[in-house]
Image (spheres, rainbow, N blue to C red):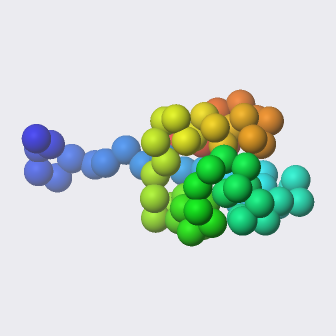
């Protein structure tokens, strides 16, 4: 259990910018990686943190290194 008042580690991302630079819609990227468009939207807005596996699949789909897509 986490001690009271301890900060959570937040994973930020450049997903929206990188997706747009490649001319991909949220729906197109979602189809490429096998998730819903809503999942992509939620990741882009920080409402959902992807699993490690999904984060890596997104990096491969965007042809980017992990650290170019996600950061703390």
The front one of 9 and 46 is 46
Q: How many marks?
A: 0
**Splitting the image into 4 quarters, where does residue 37 fall?**
bottom right
Question: Does residue 27 appear left or right of residue 9 in this picture?
Answer: right
- Residue depicted at 89% across the width and 60% down the height: 23
Question: Residue 59 placed where, x, y %?
Answer: 69, 38
**Splitting the image into 4 quarters, where does residue 43 fall?**
bottom right
- Residue depicted at 46% across the width and 59% down the height: 48
Question: Does residue 29 appear left or right of residue 56 in this picture?
Answer: right
Question: Residue 15 placed where, x, y %?
Answer: 68, 53
Question: Residue 68 placed where, x, y %?
Answer: 70, 38
- Residue depicted at 46% across the width and 64% down the height: 47
Query: Looking at the figure, which quarter contains the N terminus?
Result: top left
Question: Does residue 10 appear left or right of residue 71 in this picture?
Answer: left
**Splitting the image into 4 quarters, where does residue 60 fall?**
top right
Question: Residue 66 placed where, x, y %?
Answer: 64, 33
> Is any atom of residue 71 visible in this view?
no
- Residue depicted at 46% across the width and 42% down the height: 51
> Is any atom of residue 54 visible in this view?
yes
Q: In the image, is residue 69 above or below residue 18?
A: above
Question: Does residue 8 appear left or right of residue 43 in this picture?
Answer: left
The front one of 63 and 5 is 63
């Amino acid at each position: 259990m986490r001690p009271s008042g301890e900060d959570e580690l937040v994973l930020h991302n450049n997903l929206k910018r990188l997706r747009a630079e490649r001319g991909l819609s949220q729906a197109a990227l979602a189809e490429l990686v096998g998730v819903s468009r809503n999942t992509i939207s939620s990741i882009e807005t920080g409402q959902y943190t992807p699993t490690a596996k999904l984060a890596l699949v997104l990096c491969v789909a965007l042809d980017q290194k992990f650290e170019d897509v996600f950061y703390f």
